Every structure is written in structure tokens, then in C-alpha cells.
Amino acid sequence: MPVHQGIASSHSARLEALKNKHKLLSYKIETEQSHYILNDEEIKALKLEKLRLKEEIENIRQTS
């Protein structure tokens, strides 16, 4: 396998993992907000993590 195919495959796998984690965080935020279990700081932390993932996903897409 040529090196560039291995890198592309690695980027693709990383991108899918990030997208899945981002989706899971979206679900968790929605669920927790509807149940009022988490305090505002915990929800803020989840949203910041979600934003960080979104930015990393976009960076991978732009470099691929």
C-alpha cells in the first residue's frame, strides 16, 4: 500500500471516530438538558468538547 493511501485511510478512520464522538456528545447534551441532571458548568464543558471535535473534524477535512 502506498504511503499516501495509508495516510488517507488513517485520516478517514480518525474523521469517522470524531464524527461518532461528536454525535454522541450531541445526544448526551440533549438528554442531560432535558433531565436537568447536569449543572450549567457540566453542560458548558460538554458543549466545549463538542466544539473542539467539530473544529478537529473540519481541520481533517481541509487537509484531506
Image: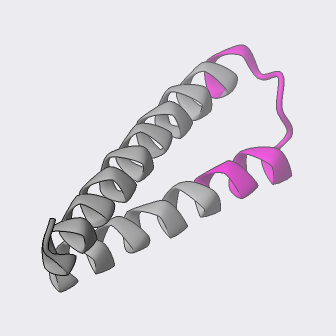
Percent position of residue 33, x then y: 65, 27
Q: Residue furthest bottom?
A: 63
Residue 37 is covered by the magenta coloring: yes
Please report the bounds of the magenta region as a residue range: 33-47
Quarter of the figure with residue 10: bottom left
Residue at 23% from the left image edge and 59% from the top image edge: 9
Q: Magenta stretch: dominant SS? A: helix
Quarter of the figure with residue 6: bottom left
In the displayed structure, 48 sits above or below 24; it is below
- Closer to the camera in the image, 36 or 8: 8
Left or right: where does residue 20 sit relative to residue 39? Answer: left
Residue at 40% from the left image edge and 73% from the top image edge: 55
Residue at 15% from the left image edge and 65% from the top image edge: 1
Left or right: where does residue 5 sit relative to residue 50? Answer: left
Residue 6 is covered by the magenta coloring: no
Percent position of residue 61, x then y: 19, 72
